[in-house]
Amino acid sequence: MTDLTSLTIAEAREGLTNKSFTARELTDAHLAAIEAARVLNAYVLETPDRAREMADAADKQIGKGEGGPLAGIPLGIKDLFATRDIRTTACSKILGNFVPPYESTVTSQLWRDGAILLGKLNNDEFAMGSSNETSCFGPVVNPWRREGSNTHLVPGGSSGGSASAVAALLCMGATATDTGGSIRQPAAFTATVGVKPTYGRCSRWGIVAFASSLDQAGPIARTVRDSAILMRSMAGHDPKDTTSVNIGVPDYEAAIGKSVKGMKIGIPKEYRLDGMPAEIEKLWSDGAAWLKAAGAELVEVSLPHTKYALPAYYIVAPAEASSNLARYDGVRYGLRVPGRSIGEMYENTRADGFGDEVRRRVMIGTYVLSAGYYDAYYLRAQKVRTLIKKDFEDCFAKGVNAILTPATPSAAFGVGEKGGADPVEMYLNDIFTVTVNMAGLPGIAVPAGKDAQGLPLGLQLIGRAFDEETLFSLGEVIEQAAGHFTPPRWW
Amino acid sequence: MNAPVTSHKLIKGATGDWEMVIGMEIHAQVVSNSKLFSGASTAFGGEPNSHVSLVDAAMPGMLPVINEECVRQAVRTGLGLNARINLRSVFDRKNYFYPDSPQGYQISQYKSPIVGEGEVELELEGGRSVTIGIERLHLEQDAGKLLHDQSPTMSYVDLNRCGVALMEIVSKPDIRDAEQAKAYVAKLRSILRYLGTCDGDMEKGSLRADVNVSVRRPGGPLGTRCEIKNMNSVNFIGQAIEYEARRQIEILEDGGTIDQETRLFDPGKGETRSMRSKEEAHDYRYFPDPDLLPLEFSQAFVDELKTTLPELPDQKKARFIADFALSPYDAGVLVAERESAEFYEAVLARLADRARDGKLAANWVINELFGRLNKEGRDITGSPVSSEQLAAIVELIGEGTISGKIAKDLFEIVWQEGGDPRALVEARGMKQVTDLGAIEKVVDDIVAANPDKVAQAKAKPQMIGWFVGQVMKSSGGKANPQAVNDLLKAKLGL
């Protein structure tokens, strides 16, 4: 029965419809796999009872021929999504044992369509991190290891639990969120597919906020098709989120297999970094060659403000975060560390409740918004953001359909290897992905090859606003050419 | 827009005259069923924390959604203040930690408010008037309330009011003395109540004012200002300004300087005291709220709202003066409160001959009705005499059925016992006697019985008043005074 976990969502959907197996069997297989993989620390909360309950309900629906598009598909949910009556912590001590009396819009749409909740997935605390090492539940371990090494590697972050669980067959797909690369970078580190939709495509309601103008929910799955299937259920207008956009949700799956002939693919010269590893260079040119072979036209494009994106991102995101995280004050829910005055209670609670990286960003954010520094930092960063957006607009205005870049500057690294002395070392992980959030555009990371040590590498495609379909079409071309990568099971 | 120097009060100091420069920030709670960014009720006086949504409590992942009715109310108010309406405005976060602010920030409007410059015309005693400029009006969230009396060691928080929409209306520093400041608050309150955008209930805190006061030599350069926070009574505002101006003058005349600071008014002691200095002022770290798109609407939306605006006090006053020849003072009294104007208009609506009785009706509403209500400490909404009853009384006078004196008795009966004034006049025989024969008999009797007075009257015609009084007395007040006068003149040969 364990090989049920290796099915794709598309395959499982067929098997469930044909009654080759039940949702309950599929769910039990995953629950067993999760139990056997606790060393990966991908789940921070397993919900087997809820999962079986939902599976039985899905089986009933399927039996009546009334199963939704995701009927019986077991998923993992990043712990940033509020799940009704189920502990939701953003992997921060400050939320403690917070149990929301509400369900995020994105997850409620998944349950509406019949999906099954296996549990809550680990992530960097408040989604701040690129290695899933800032979680109060401890780091997630990447199921991939360097050839001949037992060293634990990070799965990337902040959606490290999602990526690790999907790669290790601990769920068929997972929700994730991406503020600067938190879906695409871990997808690239684990040979999974990660989609960061256009800003406004998925509702942010009920997702613990990191940086509101950048946060966007999206799926991580094992194939491009599976990610398209999940996207259709996750996306959609929500009147409860005024930044969500009221346009129809297309049948993303229909874009899979669509010809990319004649599409113009931009190769941005500014993404060719000094000292970029040769294997990343090769991966990039392989990807370009595969798209060309499929009939796409490759053009060199310029995104001149790229080099300012990361510094600007590390002003805008912490600024918003410093304000978004002000509500964790010990007054109404979550952790409270008493003090002799209200001020002392705030200080004690927030000092004890937030980890180092969160505190660092709250302080950076507070600083850049403070009187006398606002214009020099926040305002200037917003101007840079406008220029970055314009770079992409100019590019797309010239008929470019999508832009191809590496997803990350390197493959996965070891737990504790990076960022210990200099946080910027860790921030550089997002060098290829932050521009997309700054511009509000959709991006997809697709596994495309391995480095010399046998670790997966991914390519990123950046699309026009609300044109995720083109990304799915192009992503599948790369997937077909590169093949699938599964980590050998060692846990 | 500065008022002419003669129209306001100067303060005499030991070293000469001083002039006050006053600007006000009025926080007016918007009339709406639900809060500015959530669906929770705005009802006053619920059990603590009974009107709190997930958004108001700032639960993780909650997002604000603008309440369109609050936007309409702000636009209506802007139109009522003759102000520029900004078709695009931006909500910002004002960041500060306090338990009455669950988000850790207040959503407000900082650089781009929904309403820009406007003006309010004030009428002062003695027919003087002054125009006060409006700097801006913006929408923002109200805070919750801390309860310090529930536990010996802890404070509790009630979030019912948290997130209710407020309009902050900022004046230009055009106000020059306490009288103007009080008139400004009263006028603004009146306009808001006419518009139905704020109930103006200062006791419940629906209308609160922060007052910025500085003093200078008349017409000279501006002085350093102090802000007196959170006052909810027109009289306190007047007292606080007077006290604060004198405090500042005393310091300046002693050679000192004014520290820019925030102060609180203590109504018990009648003085202001320091709350926090400029150095202790918060750095609110304003930035545009990324959860909300800029607020944009069309000119057509504004025009549509314009058509729904009620007649405002200034317009109503002008109309009363033009149509019923009311004095500006009387018209001003009638329009000051929306309910009073409504009562007067309800009386008017029931008059058959408005041109004849309109002014009389105004006199009766102001003098008899308001006078009596004031005496008993009641307001117009609790008047025992309805507009219908008062209109009937006025008409009875206007058509000559009863005299003004009888009308006062009738008013008293209606006040005490109720009933239809016409029926009462009929039933109690209060009708004015206009039968000349009957009046003539009374006149003759009185003339015959008082030969000495007749002689006096011939020498001093004003003595006719004594005869009129006697005739009215013996007719029980019902004789038509005009007829009595005419007859007496003839009989006495005056």
Image (cartoon, helix red, strand yellow):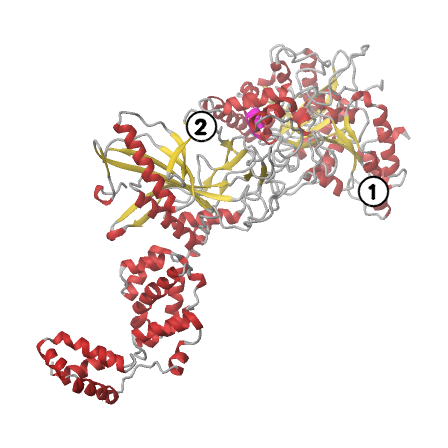
Q: Is residue B83 among what the camera can see?
A: no
Q: Which mark is residue B281?
A: 2
> The residue tagged with tag 2: helix, strand or loop?
loop
Q: Is residue A482 among what the camera can see?
A: yes
Q: Horizontal placement of A118 versus B155: left or right?
A: right
- Image quadrant containing the N terminus of chain A: top right
- Residue at (47%, 28%) from the top-left corner? B282
Tell me which corner region of the image, top left, top right, bottom left or bottom right, holds residue A191.
top right
Question: What is the x, y in percent for residue B50?
Answer: 62, 46
Q: Amino acid at mark 1?
A: Ala
**Is A182 or A132 nearer to us in this picture?**
A132
Tell me which corner region of the image, top left, top right, bottom left or bottom right, holds residue A270.
top right
Question: What is the x, y in percent for residue A244?
Answer: 61, 39
Taken as a whole, is the magenta stretch helix, strand or loop? helix
Is the residue marked by circle 2 packed among few (<14), some (14-19), or many (20+) residues within 10 Å?
A: few
Question: Mark 1 and 2 residues: CB-CB less than 8 Å, in contact?
Answer: no
**Is B19 or B175 nearer to us in this picture?**
B19
Q: Horizontal placement of A328 versus B393: left or right?
A: right
Residue farthest left in this picture: B459
Magenta range is A316-323
Question: What is the x, y in percent for residue B70?
Answer: 50, 47
Q: Which mark is residue A58?
A: 1
Q: Examine the rendered structure and indicate whether residue A149 appears above or below residue A17.
A: above
